[in-house]
Image (cartoon, helix red, strand yellow):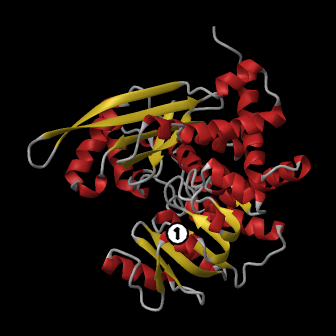
Amino acid sequence: MPGVFNDVLLSLEKANMHLNLPDGIYKRLRTPRRSLIVSVPVKMDDGTVSFFEGYRVQYDFARGPAKGGVRFHPRVNLDEITALAALMTWKCALVDIPFGGAKGGVACDPTVMSKDELERLTRRYTYEIGMLIGPESDIPAPDVYTDEQVMAWMMDTYSMMKGYSVPGVVTGKPVSLGGSLGRGKATSFGVVITVLEALAHLNMKVEDLTVSVLGFGKVGYNAARILSDAGARIIGLADSKGAIYNPQGLDIDEVVRHKREADSLHGFKGAEDLTVDELISIETDVLIPAALENQINGSNANSVKARIIAEGANTPLTAEADELLTSKGVFIIPDILANAGGVVVSYFEWVQDLQRFFWDEPAVDARLTTIMKRAFKEVALISASKKIDMRTAAMVVGVKRVAEAVETRGLYP
């Protein structure tokens, strides 16, 4: 059965219809450069040893060191990691930062593991992929169910292997270990910048804009908070257990307080409890899917009533859903553009680590804003000039830059 990587290859094929790349380069861009599968033995708290399967895929590094997150999730597999590594390749090229694309992960359920077990898992996984990663070769970052603490363990493990501190081996670290100010909200801030650019592009205003957010982790929460502060009305929120809806708007701080106490959005006073699919079908100006991939698919895409979709997550729309919604005139800000803020500020963090010179948060935000606005305008221009959707236009921009680097460097030997 075709997996998520197949959808990525379909997007690449659509982009190549407008690029007409030489056959050798096109085949090269369809194939990951390196794929590593490792066994990760972990001593559990009860004294037993469990074995987990881990992955690190470097899709392409023609434009610079490979870059991409590490996720801990039960559904992690090689197909998913390969797809995400490919998307990182196009994403880094689209925002024109000097990285290639990579991704990693471990198939595990971190929600049932203790902190000590997660530390042992992280350290052993880092050791197993240590032959690939490094500040000049491949720089991991946080992703699903990984965070600053996991990056700190990875950085420390790699540094112990080298015999000296190497802060630039990962990004998304605590500031005390060389992390960048502004990194925690960077993905969300990038989503918001592209939403605001889309509003200007479509002659819409943020005041009283209605927004629904699928996923209430770091990306979903910060996107909702920033848009609310900008004047938008957040009418719907969803987490893994369900959704809440209030057409008059939700108080984000109160929702956070409720979720902390109840471990769920459901039951929030002053809001109606819904299923996630019911929230997807609510009429809203902007829908931000910020959870896992394939959340909007053939079974629910037809019920979407949003005018704009900003993909805070990676591949939250299946190829079928994307085609259906595009044909309905929904303005889709694709993942490789909408959520690129995280990798842009990861690039800033890497630069700061290498220079041992750190910027204040306003400088980080200003640089991020400049890059995201430029990328949106480039994609919108290609979309308009070639009369193609934003996803295909974004792929055209990103893939073209990678292809140019591949062609210029040539084939060794």
**Residue bearing the label numbered 1:** 277
Q: Is residue 335 visible?
A: no
Front one among 151 and 90? 90
Q: Position of residue 379 (x, y in %)?
A: 79, 51
Seen as rendered, the residue at the extreme top is 413
Q: Where is residue 75 in the image (x, y as percent from the top left)?
A: 39, 46
Q: Measuring 73% from the left and 29% from the top, which residue is drawn there?
A: 403
Could you tell me the amino acid type at mark 1?
Asp
Classify the position of the C terminus by image quarter: top right
- Give above or below for 381 relative to 253: above
Q: How crowded is mark 1: few (under 14 residues within 10 Å), some or many (20 or more)?
A: some
Q: Where is residue 363 in the image (x, y as percent from the top left)?
A: 64, 61
Seen as rendered, the residue at the extreme left is 47
Q: Where is residue 296 in the image (x, y as percent from the top left)?
A: 57, 59
Front one among 302 and 81? 302
Q: Measuring 48% from the left and 32% from the top, which residue is drawn there?
A: 57
- Give above or below for 137 relative to 333: above
Front one among 166 and 29? 29
Q: Measuring 59% from the left and 74% from the top, which residue is drawn there?
A: 212
The number of numbered badges drawn on the structure is: 1
Q: In which quarter of the image is residue 268?
A: bottom left
Q: Can residue 128 be seen in this view?
A: yes
Q: Quadrant of residue 321?
A: bottom right
